[in-house]
Image (cartoon, rainbow, N blue to C red):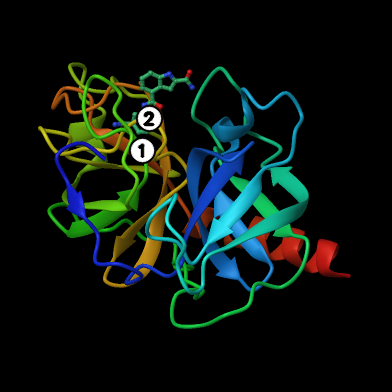
Amino acid sequence: ILRGSEARPHLKPYMASLQLDGQHVCGGFLIAEQWVLSAAHCTEETDGKLFQVLLGAHSLTEPEPHKRLYQVRAQFPHPGSNIHNNKDDLLLLQLEEKAELNTDVRVLPFQREDRDVAADTVCEVAGWGTIDHSGRRPDKLQQVQRPVISRDVCNHRTRHDGTITQNMMCTDSRRKDTCKGDSGGPLVCGGVAEGVVTAGSRVCGNYKKPAIYTRIAPYAAWIDSVMASADG
Ligand SMILES: NCc1cccc(NC(=O)c2cccc3[nH]c(C(N)=O)cc23)c1
């Protein structure tokens, strides 16, 4: 998160850190006791290894009461996701066991009604992604509030030039923005997860390249079917 601020500790108890060998790679969030939603692009450089999922954390390194690293039983990238574009950039992770819910670990509901969030709505996004252009990474969860911009503005020739589909949404990226390592985290508007951070053009903090999110509502049926099929 560029030019955000430290989140109030454990006030976003749905946040997950997807880790490989103890290193934060991407964000994610708890959508059910045994399920985390993130971005499919996060698996691009993992060459087949499964993530570990850190829940209940504020600091990535300090001991905290309800911080716990969960093993992942299975990962389900959306079948339409690919490395060439941002389409269907969603990843479901089934934890090895149900997460122990408490004050620092809680499920975040996601939007099921497929209707665009109005432009200028102020939403918030959090993550342990890079906090400056030199790629410095934070130890503590960062957050930032960003206004939604309309798909038409986001698709302007000088912005994302028509690549933003109905299954995507954008927020203003002037100065404050998401960045590397924030992918997979939720865009929360009115207490509900409306989108999942996608790297898109990978650019951070440039107003000409608004931040892009995969809208969740269009994928509610896919999410439910994967959870139902794998839960048995
Ligand atoms: N503001 C939108 C936004 C949201 C989330 C992430 C990003 N930016 C990256 O993720 C990124 C940035 C720079 C080099 C990079 N290399 C790689 C990579 N996977 O090798 C990713 C990146 C941008």
Residue 27 in percent (x, y) is at 47, 47
For image coordinates 56% across by 46% down, the residue present is 18
Residue 191 in percent (x, y) is at 32, 72
* Residue denoted by label 1: 129
Residue 169 in percent (x, y) is at 33, 44
Q: Quadrant of residue 133?
A: top left
SS at circle 2 = loop
Disc nearer the start of the sequence (2/1):
1
Residue farthest along the bottom direction in this orientation? 102
SS at circle 1 = loop
Q: Quadrant of the N terminus?
A: top left
The type of residue carrying mark 2 is Lys
> Marks 2 and 1: CB-CB under 8 Å?
yes
Q: Horizontal placement of 48 versus 116: left or right?
A: right
* Residue denoted by label 2: 180
The reply to whether the residue tagged 2 has its Cβ within 8 angstroms of ligand 1 is yes
Q: How crowded is mark 1: few (under 14 residues within 10 Å), some or many (20 or more)?
A: many
Residue 77 in percent (x, y) is at 68, 41
Q: In which quarter of the image is ligand 1?
A: top left
The reply to whether the residue tagged 1 has its Cβ within 8 angstroms of ligand 1 is yes
For image coordinates 44% across by 75% down, the residue present is 104
